[in-house]
């Protein structure tokens, strides 16, 4: 399985403050990042008005976390994904055909994060379960 390029995650979206960073695909507390990753984030311009919205979605997910049926994501295979919009990439897939881009998976595992999925729930267009 390939590694990841942290800087590549932020080619387009750079949403952050002193506590969180997001690229529009994931949000993570900066305290979980390495010193060099935080130094890289500190080079971003602070002008993104989307941060409050991203943090609200994060807080909603945390508030609902214990009331929902969740399971840890455990990949069983890796596959090549072909996409006209985002190019070709590899994804890790679990036994229920839920996929995560391999670079994201490798990043989360490198900082010792556990990945959970919400069972039998679907996010609507407003990111509500």
Image (cartoon, grey):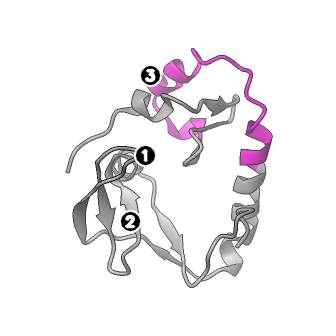
Asked if residue 23 lies left or right of residue 54, the reply is left
Asked if residue 27 lies left or right of residue 36, the reply is right
Would you say residue 43 sits in the magenta stretch?
Answer: yes
The magenta stretch spans which residues? 28-55
Give the mark toward the camera: 2 or 3. Answer: 2
Write the residue at 34% across / 33% down.
5
**Percent coordinates x, y for residue 91 in the rendering:** 31, 58
The circle on residue 42 is none
Per the model, the C-alpha gap separating discs 3 and 1 is 30 Å
Give the mark toward the camera: 1 or 2. Answer: 1
Residue on which the image places disc 3: 36
Whichever of callouts 3 and 1 sits on the residue coming sooner in the sequence is: 3
Give the mark toward the camera: 3 or 1. Answer: 1
The circle on residue 85 is 1
**Percent coordinates x, y for residue 129 in the rendering:** 70, 73
Secondary element under disc 2, as helix, strand or loop, is strand
Whichever of callouts 1 and 2 sits on the residue coming sooner in the sequence is: 1
**Percent coordinates x, y for residue 118 in the rendering:** 56, 75
Q: Residues within 10 Å of mark 2 (few under 14, many from 20)?
A: some
**Percent coordinates x, y for residue 57 in the rendering:** 73, 55
Would you say residue 41 sits in the magenta stretch?
Answer: yes
Write the residue at 52% across / 18% down.
39
Is residue 69 depicted above or below 43 in this figure?
below
């Amino acid at each position: 399985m390939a590694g990841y390029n942290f800087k590549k995650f932020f080619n387009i979206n750079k949403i952050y403050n002193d506590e969180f960073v997001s690229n529009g695909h994931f949000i993570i507390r900066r305290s979980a990042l390495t010193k060099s990753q935080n130094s890289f984030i500190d080079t971003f311009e602070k002008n993104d008005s989307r941060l409050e919205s991203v943090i609200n979605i994060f807080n909603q997910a945390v508030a609902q976390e214990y009331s929902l049926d969740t399971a840890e994501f455990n990949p069983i295979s890796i596959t090549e994904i072909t996409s006209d919009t985002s190019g070709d990439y590899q994804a890790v897939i679990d036994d229920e055909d839920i996929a995560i881009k391999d670079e994201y998976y490798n990043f989360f595992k490198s900082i010792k994060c556990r990945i959970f999925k919400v069972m039998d729930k679907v996010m609507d267009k407003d990111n509500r379960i």
